[in-house]
Image: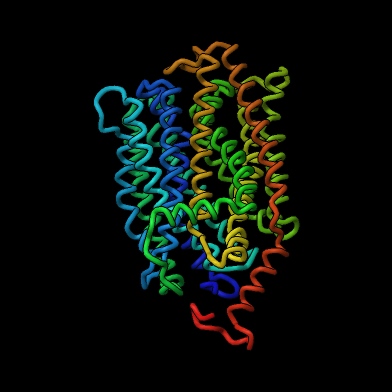
Amino acid sequence: MSLVTGPLPLRLKLMHGFGAVAFGVKDGGFSFFLLPFYNLVLGVDAGIVGAALATALVVDALVDPLIGHLCDRTYTRWGRRLPWLYIAPLPLAMAWVLLWSPPFTGVPGFWEIVALAVGVRLLLSACEVPSISMVPEITADYVERTTLFRYRFLSGWIGGLAMSVLAFTVFLPTPQSQLEPDGYALFGMVGAIVMLVSVIGSAAGQHRYVARLPDSASPPFSLARAFGEIFDAFRERAFVIFACGALAAHVSTGLSLSITLYVTRYVWQFSELAFKLYPLALGLSVIAMFLIVGPLHRRFGKPMSGAVGSLMTLAIAATPYVLFLTGLWPQTGSVLSTGLFMAFMVAANTAGVVTIISATSMVAEIVEAYEERTGKRAEGTFYAGNWLVTKAATGGGILLTSMIVQVVGLAPGTTQAAVAPDVVRNLAIAYLVVAAVLAVIASFWLSRFPITRADHEARVAARIARERGPAGVPTQAGAP
């Protein structure tokens, strides 16, 4: 049975969404600042940073699904998710501080970056997976699930953009300060506090709605059984199709964010004021997403909304680059150029976030499809898989950015005035080509997601009928 029936209380929506602020802080930090910090500030080769983050993903691939499985099996009077959300945030905050103030002498090496990245990623998984896994538990309603994801994404983007605004206005206010370590250390300390308050505050705010003893306890833990159940869940056809599309969509987003500091600095010649205004401009796209994604899902469904959103993102985001490369764009660095570029990016980011939120919301429907096939629910396992896709994509986006930076020959510490025109042109071309390939792949797979709204509602109705028993009376948990 769902934890809440009928329309969800506004307080629950707000407090559930608030927990995603921690993810927004991490995602903004990794996407916007991590590669420039280790590459341009600490002097680590961009290829080493990208390879280190890719290596950390190998650890994630093994541990993240296990976190989701253990989360599904947690059995306390506070339910399966809340204990994780009360315990994991403190070590996460400590790991976040260390990431931006590396406790090593000299230039960090490959394995040192791996250790820091793994620590942050796994601890964030221990917060995010239990939190997002509550969505299909709280409600079975197709549209109300989208509502919870709207609040999650709104909060996540607010957290990430707020930290970006602080970075560009307080911690890293000038191009010179963006090449010095002190501002990044302060960015890490403030971000750690925000993460801690976000996760624990969200858990406390939802406590009265979700704190209840699970219907049944799981059998004794076995590593072999655990990975057997994980592999069985990940073989679900709908999950495989989702993963292919979502991975490409998330990599595209990760690429766009991680390359932002490079293209706005070297291609579009942003001024100090433009750097400060850009995160605020992107915030408009999140508000637009919050208003339109619900109606889109009601009218077209989640798969079509995600597929079309991916192609729209490509068409809008590519336009400034195509005009720039063909000589039809205004002088870069001018007010007109900066304003137009921001307008295009607001529209493109709106479509991109619609794609991501559509894909993420699809996972909730996979839970019922898997339950129909196996008789078991595995919210944590599936959302650990989704979380692994998300983190793989963030790392993949950073890896692609690092490869692009190396291929075009952009040296660490290069100032705006010193970059060669050929390097600028090649940077724009490389980004455009890679983004186009990813958008087409994402659209192809998301459009083929096999679970429609009608399919989901039929499964929910069948489950309710089973729970009520042949006489239409609710059966006790665990009763045949």
Q: Nearer the viewer, residue 347 or 469?
A: 469
Q: Is residue 176 visible?
A: no
Give me the residue at 42% from left, 61% from top.
Answer: 202
Query: Taking 97 as reference, is 398 left or right?
Result: right
Q: Quadrant of the C terminus?
A: bottom right
Give me the residue at 69% from left, 19% from top.
Answer: 325
Give me the residue at 48% from left, 61% from top.
Answer: 16
Task: Say if 268 sits above or below 254 in the image.
Answer: above
Give me the residue at 58% from left, 20% from top.
Answer: 427
- Residue 328 is situated, as x and y percent measured from the top left of the image, at 73, 20
Residue 465 sits in which quadrant?
A: bottom right
- Residue 239 is situated, as x and y percent measured from the top left of the image, at 60, 51
Q: Quadrant of the N terminus?
A: bottom right
Q: Nearer the viewer, residue 162 or 338?
A: 162
Describe the colour scheme in one phrase. rainbow
Residue 424 sits in which quadrant?
A: top right
Q: Is residue 227 visible?
A: yes
- Residue 141 is situated, as x and y percent measured from the top left of the image, at 62, 67
Q: How many marks?
A: 0
Task: Say if 146 sits above or below 424 in the image.
Answer: below
- Residue 471 is situated, as x and y percent measured from the top left of the image, at 63, 88
